Amino acid sequence: MTIKTFEENGTTVIAPEGKIDHVTVEEFENKINELVESNDTLTLDMIGVEYVSSAALRAILNVNDSLESKGGLVIKNVNQKIMEIFRITGFADYLDIR
């Protein structure tokens, strides 16, 4: 997994590529938690993500909860496979997915 970060329309975007699973979730959590400390709003661009494990779902939920009282977390470019996981787990009703 690789993780890119960049600014887009005044918002910090984190764009992981590859799988977010039990092997890579710690790297993902460390990077995203670092960004939460210095940002009120984050966008998680999942265009390059091909798989998320339950550990990744937990990490995404934790970030969403951390930013909820600030500006929030926006998730975009979710593929159909991952969107189905979000629907089955109920995350689709809870997260701001665009």
Image: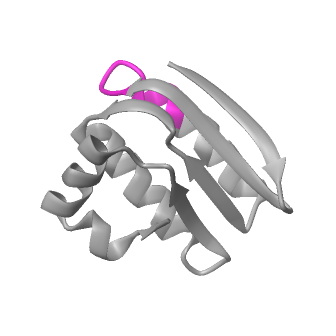
Q: Is residue 14 left or right of residue 49?
A: right
Front residue of 16 and 79: 79
- Whole-percent x, y for residue 27 in the image: 52, 26
The answer to if 51 sits in the magenta stretch is: no
The answer to which quarter of the image holds residue 19 is top left
| Residue drawn at x 51%, y 58% as measured from the top left | 75
Front residue of 25 and 87: 87
The number of numbered badges drawn on the structure is 0
| Residue drawn at x 34%, y 74% as measured from the top left | 94
- Whole-percent x, y for residue 87 in the image: 20, 62
Give the magenta-colored segment's residue range.
20-28
- Whole-percent x, y for residue 71 in the image: 67, 76
| Residue drawn at x 20%, y 67% as measured from the top left | 90
Front residue of 49 and 26: 49
The answer to if 21 sits in the magenta stretch is: yes
Considering every residue shown, the one lying at the far front of the view is 80
- Whole-percent x, y for residue 12 in the image: 76, 52
| Residue drawn at x 13%, y 59% as measured from the top left | 88
Front residue of 78 and 90: 78
Q: Is residue 41 left or right of residue 27?
A: right
What colouring style does the render use? one colour
Is 22 situated above or below 73?
above
Considering every residue shown, the one lying at the far bottom of the view is 69
Is 96 situated above or below 50?
below
